[in-house]
Image (cartoon, rainbow, N blue to C red):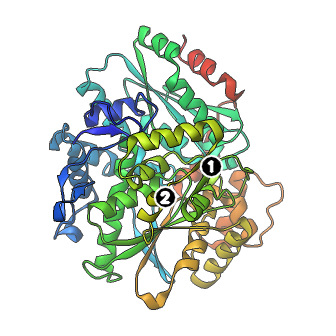
Amino acid sequence: MKYISTRDSNAVPVSGAVAIARGLAPDGGLYVPQYRGQGAGGREQDFPAYFPADLTHKSYCELAEDIFALYLEDFSRAELAHVARAAYAGGAFPPAVAPCVQVGPFTVLELFHGPTCAFKDMALAALPHFLTLAAAKTEQAGEIVILVATSGDTGKAAQEGLANVAGCRLIVFYPAGGVSEIQERQMLSGGGHNTAAVAVRGNFDDCQRGVKAIFADVTMGRQLAQAGLSFSSANSINFGRLLPQIVYYYHAYAQMLAQGSVKAGQCIDIAVPTGNFGNILAAYYARGMGLPVRRLICASNENDVLVEAINAGHYNSRRPFHKTASPSMDILVSSNFERFLFEMYGRGADALATAFAQFAATGSLHIADEARRNWQGLLYGGSAAGNAAARTIAAVFAEHNYLLDPHTAVGWTVASNHYDQAEGIPLLLTATASPYKFSAAVLKALGVPCGDLNGEEQMQLLAEHTKTTIPAPLAALAHSNPRPRQKIGVADMGRTVLELLGL
């Protein structure tokens, strides 16, 4: 399979290795799989078909290897088996990797059992192995400099995945004051000798724009090349970050089959608390491959730019920005929404390039009516403010003795508004982070005052109040030695990269 850009219909398709090594297409677009040929009824097929009869008997690593092989044909099965085992079978995850549990009316897919207790681990455990293989396949000399913009979880997960990986350096940018205390402590305490984390005065969108501007800086690119370095990304703009996320939706369906909450071939709905649109886009890809999914529910907090785009066709980033108790969703420019729009525009790169040129100039674009019609009945958008999500945290704990983090609580709240038990359609809710990463917000929702307690003390109080256990990676923060925080302006991001690289 080759890869094409969302913005240039005339660009030469590239291999999976090139797409992963580059991260972002030269024209500023995102790499997407090229059509594979004709599907049923002569219709062009977007994605490879995959729904094995022995789905329930496949391990997580076997599913990962199969799905990786469908998209990365320039990688050998042995290489992909190595990636899967190194990512998921090395002890960083429990045997179930991403277990499903039944909580009230919903099946909850717990994606927070990795080394940083957030769903980003699921992809970033595999990405470093993809990157090193891709660098070798593209004969890329020197080191890869990986830049990451994070709204809280990607940064630490990237540090864990890339710590001390030969041939890679990692620089993480996160919004100062825009992540939880525990998230910041994780980033400043983790990583190897090859990683750095820098706070930026601004929000996640500022960080993301800054990183994209660095990628587009031709002069800086020459400086890196002269030093034997090249840029790539660990954000979900990199298809190598998105691909592993498809796997856990298949794994979830297999568990639902085994648990008897769904019958073979029966459709499910999937609700996803959404920030940068990568997690829900992976569910869309899984559906395109044949996973029985009826509809996708995109859940947002007060920063509901995606809800307006989905429901009204107006994608507008020039709107008030809200700092919320679910900071990983505090995003006004959702990069992966471009990949979804590419599909809804009938893979019309030229039309999309025009639309995003308008978006870059004005911060707003009107989505064509035909594109919107293409997602009718498939994609639903809804938002939940912080007070509604807090009530959900309290209610779910009181009724089911189950703790939700603020992001998953947004997903539960929105899913409840779209769920009709009489329809008989099982609903899968993705739980994206451990509640202990947001102890202060969860304690507040439960009506437990935490005063001036620090992050570690808040976690301990939450454990005592709920009689639950602090995850080991977060409990270990009490013994960590965080680096001093470096805080810069958005305009200083490029200079900071050069300084950290010694250029």
State the residue at coordinates (19%, 37%). 74
Where residue 387 appears, x then y in whole percent?
74, 69
Residue shown at the point (35%, 48%) measured from the top left = 347
Around disc 2, counting alpha carbons within 10 Å, would you say few (fewer than 14), some (14 to 19), or many (20 or more)? many
Circle 1 residues within 10 Å: few <14, some 14–19, many ≥20: many
> Tag 2's secondary structure?
loop
Kindly identify which numbered label has been placed on residue 410: none
Q: Give the amino acid type for the residue marked by disc 1 in the picture.
A: Ile
Q: Which residue corresponds to mark 2? A: 112
| Location of residue 153 with respect to 197 vertically, above or below | below
Rendered image: mark on residue 331: 1
In the drawing, does residue 257 fall left or right of residue 387?
left
Disc 1 + disc 2, Cβ < 8 Å: no
Looking at the image, tell me whether mark 1 or mark 2 is earlier in sequence order.
2
* Residue 426 on image: x %, y %: 41, 80
Residue 2 is situated, as x and y percent measured from the top left of the image, at 24, 39
Which residue type carries mark 2? Phe
